[in-house]
Amino acid sequence: IKNEIDSGYLVPLNKEGTLHTTIFHLKNETSVVKSVTQLNNKDSLLKTQDNSSLSRYLTADNGSFKSVSIIGGGSFLISSVSKIGELATENERQHIIIAPSVKVKEFLKNNLEKNNTVLTVNEFLKDGGDTGKKLISLYQSENMKLDAVNDILNNEKKNDSVIVSIDTKTKNSEGLFTDVLRKAEVDNFMVIDKNENKKTYFINDVDKSDRVNLAAKQYMTLSLTNKDAIIQVSDDKTKNMVNEQVRNTLKDNGFLSDKKITIRNENRVYLDESN
């Protein structure tokens, strides 16, 4: 590492010398921030009749670079990207979605309307479509290489394009495009899926001996409110203990009969020369 630093290839990022980057990456960071600033100083002139919070944010000022974080399930992500596509159509712009991989591209193509053009980063850099007005969504920008994002921004700031960076929070590491935006204090808008049917509860400070009883109690509570309950455990031994405790709890509360029916669905068959 010392030789790389002495040669100028590696640049230390902290005084302790525990974090480094390449001079190439550092130049890309500088160039990306410069391009984002230049785009933000250009009027996008986007207008909308839609009253959703996402559409209002994208048209709130005239900057041509927008950063959004979308947190939610697959259907929520698709509906949010579709909303951006509708905004593009409303403003007579071509909506191009750039995906970080072929897998993500296929997911988007299979779930979005046909009026959205979906390309991988490499496909876009090779042939980014016509030079007309475009609204470009960088989908999962947290998974895009910084040099590729730099090339996209450098090309499109000349074409009067509007760029929307979409961070889906699948990765959060030092030096990523989304990390560079955060350090540069670029305004970011959060879009969060508020599905009231999805609730996660964390119960802390439970003794190991009480976990089975607590799981059975929670199961009973959910059952009484007509909610489906699934208890996930790590091994067969715990599974049998939980199942037994849940049955006993249901019996004690009159939800399960004491009667038992044993059904044998498998019999061992021993094969030898006689059969």
Image (spheres, grey):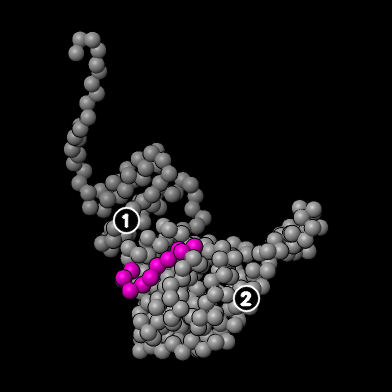
Q: Secondary structure at mark 2?
A: helix
Which image quadrant for residue 135?
Answer: bottom left
Q: Earlier in the sequence, mark 2 or mark 1?
A: 2
Task: Tell me where the magenta segment starts and ends, as one range.
Answer: 112-124
Which image quadrant for residue 104?
Answer: bottom left
Disc number for residue 157: none
Q: Amino acid at mark 2?
A: Val
Assign the C terminus to one quadrant of the image. Answer: top left
The answer to whether residue 117 is magenta is yes
Q: Which residue is mark 2?
A: 33
Q: Is residue 60 placed above or below 188 in the rendered structure?
A: below
The answer to whether residue 41 is magenta is no
Which image quadrant for residue 37?
Answer: bottom right
Q: Amino acid at mark 1?
A: Ala
Q: Is residue 80 left or right of residue 156?
A: left
x, y percentage for residue 110?
A: 32, 63
x, y percentage for residue 65?
A: 52, 80
Q: Is residue 29 left or right of residue 268?
A: right
Residue at 49% from the left image edge and 53% from the top image edge: 206
Q: Which residue is mark 1?
A: 229
Q: CA distance from mark 2 to mark 1?
A: 48 Å
Q: Secondary structure at mark 1?
A: loop
x, y percentage for residue 187?
A: 56, 80
Residue 261 versus residue 111: which sits nearer the camera? 111
x, y percentage for residue 140?
A: 48, 66
Observer able to see residue 274: yes
Observer able to see residue 140: no
Outermost residue toward the right in this view = 6
Residue at 59% from the left image edge and 82% from the top image edge: 38
Residue at 61% from the left image edge and 70% from the top image edge: 180
